[in-house]
Image (tube, grey):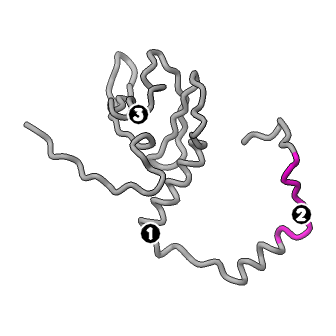
Amino acid sequence: MTRAPEKQRPRSPGQSRKNLGQGSLATSGNSHALRIDKSFVRSNPVLAQTGLRVRFKKVATNTFVFVVLDAAPDADEGDPVVESYLAFLESDMRSAPSRLTPLTEQDASGLERLVRGVTVDDTAEISPDVTL
């Protein structure tokens, strides 16, 4: 018995095959395992390492971020948390566009009042105490 092919959702800008992958959960001994499709691993060779350690975090309902702990980051990669948040926003905007509202003059005035008197030095170093 063969399965019908899954419908492909159109990719939004910035979503390449390297950035999107699929997999499934499986059982391995007394643990659960995440099986990642071979094409995604081929596009991201760091995932092919045996014994690779990862950290994962739930960032929204049904949305998780996995971070490879033992590998040097790609120079062209962005922050996985920011990328996940932006993907969540995109999904939310597409699923409920009626919730989008334009920025009004009143909103802008409120923002101006909020930051009045705040000075910013774009060249200042960020304290090591700050977690980004």
Which quadrant would residue 31 be assigned to in this image? top left
Q: Which mark is residue 41?
A: none
Residue 30 at x, y = what percent? 38, 18
Between residues 31 and 100, which one lies in front from this camera angle? 100
Q: Helix or strand or loop: what does disc 1 sit on?
A: loop
Q: Are marks 1 and 2 in contact (CB under 8 Å)?
A: no
Q: Is residue 103 magenta?
A: no
Q: Which residue is mark 2?
A: 118
Which quadrant would residue 114 be assigned to in this image? bottom right
Residue 112 at x, y = what percent? 81, 74
Q: Which residue is mark 3?
A: 43
Between residues 62 and 126, which one lies in front from this camera angle? 126
Badge 1 local density, few (<14 within 10 Å), some, or many (20+)? Answer: few
Residue at image x 45%, y 42%? 19
Compared to residue 12, the image places residue 41 above or below, namely above
Q: Is residue 27 left or right of residue 123?
A: left
Amino acid found under the numbered disc labelled 2: Val
Magenta stretch bounds: 114-124
Between residues 51 and 19, which one lies in front from this camera angle? 19
Per the model, the C-alpha gap separating discs 3 and 2 is 45 Å
Residue at image x 42%, y 22%? 48
- Of pointers 3 and 1, the one earlier in the residue sequence: 3
Amino acid found under the numbered disc labelled 3: Ser
Per the model, the C-alpha gap separating discs 1 and 2 is 35 Å
